[in-house]
Image (cartoon, rainbow, N blue to C red):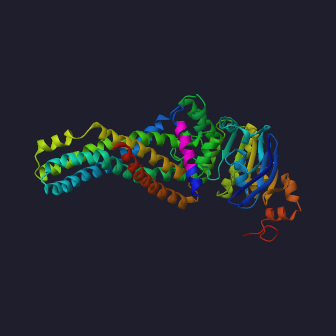
């Protein structure tokens, strides 16, 4: 049973990947999906990023103060956000928001025979439904992460400088001085992978939903849980590879 | 035109079709009747390659569709139109975009030309001027009509009807029956319908086949079926709970 699911999942991933490089592209649907996955997630991502940056500043400031290293708060906030918290938290939020929506939409299309209807209209449902979501996820996740990174750093700065009384010039210098481009690129690469994971897992769950409304519910829950798990697992392995 | 040969299909060890043989001639409407869960839907889904059989074949114009590559199969599918039980309209698209879907995907027509064709097809099913509605705004009968308009958009040679009258009131059901007869007379399509509605079967069918226990139990013209003294067929057409077919 599990082997069957894994096999089916890989076949779908492979088909999606190979259709990604075949024209024509349905740009209208790709943009629609970029809006659904990316733009519509912005409010949640911004709030998440702002408060993450803020809490990081408080925690590291009070911690570092014990050994007089308050100056490094900016560095720690920027590094942990760029490498880990930005991509991971964004990945988790998008899993919950966009992953659930994708699985529910495709699941409903499956149980109301709309996917079968696509096939009878000589249209490949992987190409028409899955590929645009796959491409949109791949493009949009890194964009969200860039925004999350910037907002988090701003959040950290606001708290450190205006609440905890850190020196603004030193804080900014310490934020930029020790961070390398590779830290940011690494985070963005992770984000691309998370985008692929979320869209693949969610589309897969929706695509093979069965059993009416209950089945769609199950597919949606499964999509969110599985996406989140895979995001966290992939995150560890990518961190181990990228940031040694 | 369509030959179904020794078709077997099982799901999770449950044998649904065990050797279906059925020939459908060009230009006729074949109605397959049978109880709920008898495998009618499974059978019709094999004809257009939505399901792959465990054994046996489906030949369309002499070509086994399960021996084709995906591209070839899709070309064969363009000969077909299918009306689904719940119409299966794409709910993110408007009515005319639904009807013109295949034209947009497979032809070079401009948006305006597709719109014109879609409006003409909608007129054929009695829904003139409703192209801008969304599927969620339609009643059950209208949805079926739009589904039918979508099925005939590419001028198919074969139309498949999955329970065309299920879920409709008797008058709307009869209107759909009329449309199905119309399709045969006006655009000369070959039809395959599955139903358990005997009124519909008598009205639209040139021949009626009864699917029972995974096989074709009997086949004949509507008059022959009405006169049949086979106990299974008699029980089904008279709608009795007493007889060889077990009502579970």
For the C terminus of chain B, give its image quadrant. Answer: bottom right
Relative height, residue A134 to residue B107 (above, below): below
Q: Residue A14 in magenta?
A: yes
Predominant secondary structure, magenta span: helix
* Count of labels in the image: 0
Q: Residue A17 in magenta?
A: yes
Relative height, residue B128 to residue A67 (above, below): above
Picture coordinates of residue B109 (x, y %)?
58, 28
Picture coordinates of residue B130 (x, y %)?
55, 43
Bounds of the magenta segment: A8-19
Query: Residue shown at 21%/41% (left/top)?
Result: A178
Picture coordinates of residue A197 (x, y %)?
45, 47
In the orientation shown, which residue stands out farthest toward the front? A244
Residue B81 falls left or right of residue A207: right
A107 or B145, which lies in front? A107
Query: Residue shown at 20%/54% (left/top)?
Result: A60
B86 or B105, which lies in front? B105
Q: Is residue A120 visible?
A: yes
A185 or B144, which lies in front? A185
For the N terminus of chain B, give its image quadrant. Answer: top right
Query: Residue shown at 81%/56% (left/top)?
Result: B215
Relative height, residue B220 to residue B242 (above, below): above
Picture coordinates of residue B39 (x, y %)?
73, 57
């Amino acid at each position: 049973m599990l082997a069957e699911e894994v096999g089916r999942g890989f076949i779908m991933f492979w088909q999606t990947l190979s259709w990604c490089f075949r024209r024509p592209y349905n740009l209208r649907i790709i943009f629609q999906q970029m809006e659904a996955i990316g733009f519509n997630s912005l409010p949640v991502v911004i709030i998440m990023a702002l408060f993450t940056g803020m809490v990081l500043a408080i925690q590291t400031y009070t911690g570092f103060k014990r050994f007089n290293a308050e100056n490094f708060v900016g560095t720690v906030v920027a590094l942990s956000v760029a490498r880990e918290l930005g991509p991971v938290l964004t990945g988790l939020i998008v899993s919950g928001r966009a992953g659930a929506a994708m699985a529910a939409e495709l699941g409903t299309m499956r149980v109301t025979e709309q996917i079968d209807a696509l096939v009878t209209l000589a249209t490949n449902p992987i190409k028409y439904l899955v590929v645009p979501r796959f491409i949109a996820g791949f493009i949009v996740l890194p964009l969200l992460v860039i925004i999350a990174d910037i907002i988090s750093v701003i959040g950290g700065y606001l708290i450190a400088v205006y609440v905890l009384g850190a020196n603004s010039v030193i804080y900014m210098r310490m934020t930029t001085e020790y961070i390398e481009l590779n830290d940011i690129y690494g985070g963005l690469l992770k984000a691309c992978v998370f985008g692929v994971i979320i869209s693949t897992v969610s589309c897969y769950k929706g695509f093979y939903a069965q059993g009416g409304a209950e089945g769609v519910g199950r597919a949606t829950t499964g999509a969110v849980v599985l996406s989140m798990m895979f995001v966290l697992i992939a995150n560890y392995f990518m961190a181990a590879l990228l940031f040694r | 035109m369509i030959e179904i040969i020794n078709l077997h299909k099982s799901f999770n060890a449950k044998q649904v079709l065990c050797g279906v043989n059925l020939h459908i001639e060009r230009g006729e409407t074949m109605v397959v009747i049978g109880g709920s869960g008898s495998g009618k839907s499974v059978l019709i889904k094999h004809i257009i390659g939505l399901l792959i059989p465990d054994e046996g074949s489906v030949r369309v114009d002499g070509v086994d569709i399960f021996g084709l590559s995906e591209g070839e199969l899709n070309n064969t599918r363009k000969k077909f139109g299918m009306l689904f039980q719940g119409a299966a309209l794409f709910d993110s698209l408007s009515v005319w975009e639904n009807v013109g879907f295949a034209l947009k995907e497979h032809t070079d027509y401009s948006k305006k030309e597709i719109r014109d064709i879609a409006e003409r097809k909608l007129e054929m099913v009695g829904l003139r001027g409703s192209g801008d509605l969304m599927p969620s705004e339609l009643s059950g009968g209208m949805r079926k009509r739009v589904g039918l308009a979508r099925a005939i958009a590419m001028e198919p040679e074969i139309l498949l009807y999955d329970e065309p009258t299920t879920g409709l009131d008797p008058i709307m059901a009869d209107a759909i029956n009329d449309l199905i007869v119309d399709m045969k007379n006006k655009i000369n399509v070959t039809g395959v319908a599955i139903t358990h509605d005997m009124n519909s079967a008598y009205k639209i069918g040139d021949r009626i086949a009864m699917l029972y226990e995974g096989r074709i139990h009997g086949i004949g013209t509507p008059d022959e079926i009405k006169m049949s003294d086979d106990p299974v067929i008699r029980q089904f057409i008279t709608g009795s709970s007493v007889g060889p077919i077990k009502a579970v």
